């Protein structure tokens, strides 16, 4: 027996009802439509893009204010992205694999990304792309560069932003990649932010 959950974007997610009979093993829950779509998308991503997508999903889950459907969908996307990343790690770790060097390099960039998120404030980067926030009460708010309207719909914190209207969200890396001209890639954005934070970084 199953039930359907309708998620934003008209995705229908079918899940087993607790206690209902199922011919699937208990250790292998059925994959939702959201996870299956994310698995297809993940295969087409570069490793840098995969890491960036995981960071966005992690921010969504850390917020703690998602409704049940949105939280379920975020967890499903994370499962698909994690599985694809782990598959790549296994390949990178094979003896004699030329990808092993890239795996170590990837970890270096992940460390740099974590550091710039700590050092660079989202408000500073928003000002650079033409959307400086202002203080309203105890919080910072500003116009959203994604929906490009209004002057207070974007909630701005040190490490992430969220638009109350269009639901766009991200961290300093996402802001730079999305709205800074000439900085399209994950590493490009990290390199730009390391310069902003006066950090040393290799090519």
Image: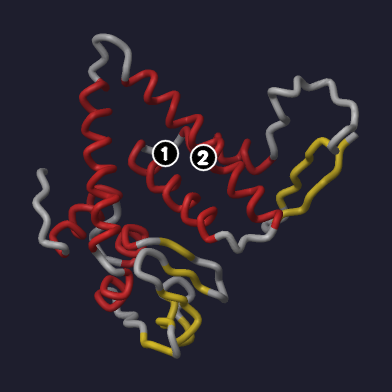
Q: Which quarter of the rendering shows the C terminus?
A: top left
- Give the residue at mark 1: 45
- Identify whether 91 is placed above or below 133: above
Q: Is residue 90 left or right of residue 130?
A: right
The answer to which image quadrant residue 68 occupies is bottom right
**Residue at 60% across / 63% down in the picture?**
65
Q: Nearer the viewer, residue 170 or 178?
A: 170
Q: Position of residue 86 (x, y in %)?
A: 44, 27
**Residue at 41% across / 41% down in the picture?**
50
Residue 41 image label: 2
Q: Residue reaching furthest top?
A: 95
Q: Is residue 169 left or right of residue 109?
A: right
Q: Position of residue 184 (x, y in %)?
A: 29, 55
Q: Position of residue 197 (x, y in %)?
A: 16, 62
C-alpha gap between disc 1 and disc 2: 7 Å
Local packing at callout 1 (Cα closer than 10 Å; few below 14, some 14-19, many 20+) is some
Total number of numbered labels? 2
**Residue at 18% across / 53% down in the picture?**
191
Q: Which quarter of the rendering shows the N terminus?
A: top right
Say whether marks 1 and 2 touch (CB < 8 Å): yes
- Identify whether 110 is placed above or below 65: above
Q: Residue reaching furthest bottom?
A: 137
Q: Position of residue 158 (x, y in %)?
A: 35, 69
SS state under label 2: helix
Q: What colouring style does the render use?
A: secondary structure
């Amino acid at each position: 027996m199953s039930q359907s959950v309708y998620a934003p974007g008209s995705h229908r997610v079918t899940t087993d009802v607790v206690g209902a009979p199922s011919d699937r093993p208990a250790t292998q829950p059925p994959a939702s439509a959201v996870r299956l779509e994310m698995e297809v998308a993940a295969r087409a991503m570069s490793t840098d893009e995969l890491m960036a997508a995981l960071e966005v999903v992690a921010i969504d889950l850390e917020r703690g204010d998602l409704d049940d459907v949105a939280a379920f969908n975020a967890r499903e996307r994370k499962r698909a992205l994690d599985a694809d990343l782990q598959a790549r790690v296994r390949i990178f770790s094979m003896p004699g694999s030329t990808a092993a060097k890239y795996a170590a390099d990837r970890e270096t960039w992940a460390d740099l990304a974590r550091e710039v998120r700590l050092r660079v404030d989202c408000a500073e980067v928003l000002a650079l792309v033409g959307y400086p926030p202002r203080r309203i009460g105890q919080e910072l708010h500003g116009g959203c560069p994604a929906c490009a309207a209004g002057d207070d719909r974007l909630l701005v914190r040190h490490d992430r932003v969220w638009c109350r209207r269009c639901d766009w969200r991200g961290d300093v890396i996402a802001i730079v990649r999305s709205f800074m001209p000439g900085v399209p890639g994950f590493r490009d954005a990290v390199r730009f932010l390391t310069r902003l934070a006066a950090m040393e970084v290799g090519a």
